[in-house]
Image (tube, rainbow, N blue to C red):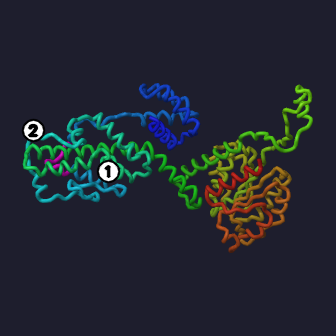
Amino acid sequence: MDRTLTSFIAALRNADVRISTAETLDAMSAVELCGYRNREFLKDTLALVLPKTPDEKYTFDETFDQFFAFKDVKGESVVTELDGDGEEAEGEGGAGQGQGGAVGEGTDGRKGGGKKKKFSAFEEQQDEEDLGPGEMAQPRSSLGKLLMQDSRVELTVNMAAAAKEVSLEEIQVFTQKGLYTRKIMEEMGLADLQQEISVVRQSPSILDRRLGQELKKRREWLREQVRDYVEKQFLLYADATGKKLREELLRKVKLSNIEHRNFRLVQEVVFRMAKRLVALHSRRKKVFKRGQLHVSRTLRHNMSYDGSIFDLHWKSVKIDRPKVFAICDVSGSVANYARFMLMFLYSLEEVMPKVRSFAFSSDLAEVTDLFERNKLEDAIAKTLRDYSGGSTDYGQAFEDFRNKCLDEIDNRTTIIILGDARNNYGDPRTEILKEMYDRSKRLIWLNPESRNTWNVGDAEMRKYSAYVHQAEECNSLTHLERIVGNLLRTIQ
């Protein structure tokens, strides 16, 4: 039963429900008390220890209902409507096995590669033979007996047990459906059933040949049931896994290469990354037993011990939250980078609540109010629409920044500049950047281009690099997360 619970927790984690190791142990202790007999009682018990937020509780309810839904195989009719020779079911079974590189097996035990199986002339003659209704021999294979008994509940139990044996919960992509279907069938006893069908269909006895035809029909019916079961388990275990694979890819590709149809998924990734950084850096700093001793506080707190020093108190320094100035080039070549950097910074408002944003292509304008009055996505769209025109001029942008707020820069200020430093051969105004460098605590330049192009053509990165504390290549979400994470560690 522990395996059942751990599989359920794996499904919850795939559905983005955060569950720690300690919470897993709590769930196991709770299940020991309530057991699996009462489904609703089990659900209410696990709901107390696993989900934590309203969204997670909603996801928990859906995942629980899907995971613990014991639906037996379809009961309308065990024997599906087939043509007289069963060719239709045989073809469907072969096609299903073709997915994911899986191969079906013919009645002679050879691999069929997903194509319609080819029988010998004798077997074709047997298929065309109309034996009519009547008595048939008794099956000898365990799976054959199970199929002929029409015990749908027992078949479902065996199917679930076989799925556990082949680790169906590890399915990751949809193309593995055929592979796991074949594995489950083999675990249930397909080999013995295939051998029995092959033998009885070549028997001179009509009773045996009737049994062979019936077992073949039921085998294909069972294959369809297993395939349906694998699809449902794929949706349970691998739907989120497939999404995570796409997210991992989007974290690594250049932001300029991301298509518009993927923006929504990238936004979800950005918010999740920001949430993780918030959780990491918003915790109150503990006062560790190290540093400089606070003598007066130590003596005051130990007066009750007649002067004996039992409790040591250490001096602590109050750390103010930083002021962040984000200056973004929103010209066409780097607009996507600016979009996601602004999204990232404003998603960190719990740990960086004083973000002021500036956008420019030629003239620079403050867009902080846009983000205060509008939703984050709308503010970014307005910024890119209103300020992305014009020829890029970093010198003019630095001049505008000095006129607007250079006096507000102090030793608690971090300035982040996002741009490719391509100035169209204009005046770079490095003296203004030097003033910003001297006044601020930290000045970081994030360049979306690769380092080997920083000084090619009209790029002024070599001149600007002399007046920044840190210059980094930043053209993917992975780069952005690492840089912002390091920034939070250094300024808090």
Q: Residue at x 77, y 55 (%)?
A: 415
The spot of residue 429 in percent (x, y) is: 80, 66
Q: Is residue 396 left or right of residue 21?
A: right
The spot of residue 403 in percent (x, y) is: 83, 56
* Image mark for residue 182: 1
Q: Amino acid at mark 1?
A: Arg
Query: Closer to the camera, 315 or 440?
Result: 315
The spot of residue 271 in percent (x, y) is: 61, 46
* Image mark for residue 135: 2
Q: Residue at x 48, y 48 (%)?
A: 241
Which secondary structure, mark 1? helix
**Would you identify the image quadrant in which residue 188 lies?**
top left
Query: Closer to the camera, 219 or 337?
Result: 219
Q: Amino acid at mark 2?
A: Glu
Looking at the image, residue 10 lies above or below residue 244: above
Query: Closer to the camera, 189 or 102?
Result: 189
Q: Is residue 194 left or right of residue 419?
A: left
**Would you identify the image quadrant in which residue 146 lies?**
top left
Q: Residue at x 22, y 37 (%)?
A: 77
For marks 1 and 2, give the CA distance: 31 Å
Span of residues in magenta: 80-87
